[in-house]
């Protein structure tokens, strides 16, 4: 699969994919005889994983560390798990914060029109 096809499939830019490869988030992508990137299904699985983690707010640096540990082999399983556990904890914390914001917005929106009409009437 070409870089353009992968970019379209995952809703990213080719520049982002090149950046991910350059910083070590993606393995060295195979090339065709003419030098064009040729993404395998395994490469695409990494792209999907990275996109998911980035959308959850996981930093590029954290993901680079995770990939680095993966490349070192089975002796890093515990360290990888700890990294993922910490990311999960941070995501749960952000979800709780967002839920509080949502509750406040819901409260603000409950009866919003009626309150605004009364407010406007009091201004007259």
Image: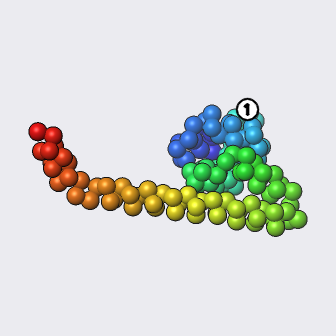
Q: Secondary structure at mark 1?
A: loop
Q: Residue at x 46, y 61 (%)?
A: 99
| Image position of 34 with respect to 64: above or below | above
Q: Which residue is nearer to you in this view: 23 or 96?
A: 96
Q: Quadrant of the C terminus?
A: top left
Question: Closest to the observer: 104 or 123?
Answer: 123
Is residue 31 at least partly visible in the picture? no
Q: Is residue 45 visible?
A: yes
Q: Position of residue 69 (x, y in %)?
A: 82, 56
Question: Residue at left 39%, top 61%?
Answer: 103
Horizontal side of 11 relative to 83 (left or right) equals left
Against 11, residue 15 (above or below) is above
> Quarter of the image holding residue 34?
top right
Residue 109 left/right relative to 10:
left
Left or right, 112 with reference to 55: left
Residue identified by numbered label 1:
34
The number of numbered discs placed on residues in the rendered structure image is: 1
Q: Residue at x 63, y 33 (%)?
A: 15
What is the x, y in percent for residue 21? 72, 41
Q: Quadrant of the N terminus?
A: top right
Q: Residue at 88%, 65% (x, y): give it.
A: 75
In this rendering, position of residue 116 left or right of residue 4: left
């Amino acid at each position: 699969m070409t870089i353009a096809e992968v970019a379209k499939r995952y809703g990213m830019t080719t520049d982002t994919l090149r950046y991910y490869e350059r910083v070590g988030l993606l393995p060295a992508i195979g090339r065709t005889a003419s030098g064009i990137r040729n993404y395998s299904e395994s490469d695409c699985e990494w792209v999907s994983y990275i996109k998911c983690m980035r959308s959850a707010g996981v930093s590029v640096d954290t993901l680079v560390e995770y990939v680095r540990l993966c490349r070192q082999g089975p002796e890093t399983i515990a360290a990888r798990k700890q990294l993922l556990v910490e990311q999960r904890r941070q995501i749960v914390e952000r979800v709780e914060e967002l839920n509080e914001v949502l509750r406040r917005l819901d409260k603000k929106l409950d009866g919003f029109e009626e309150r605004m009409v009364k407010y406007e009437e009091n201004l007259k």
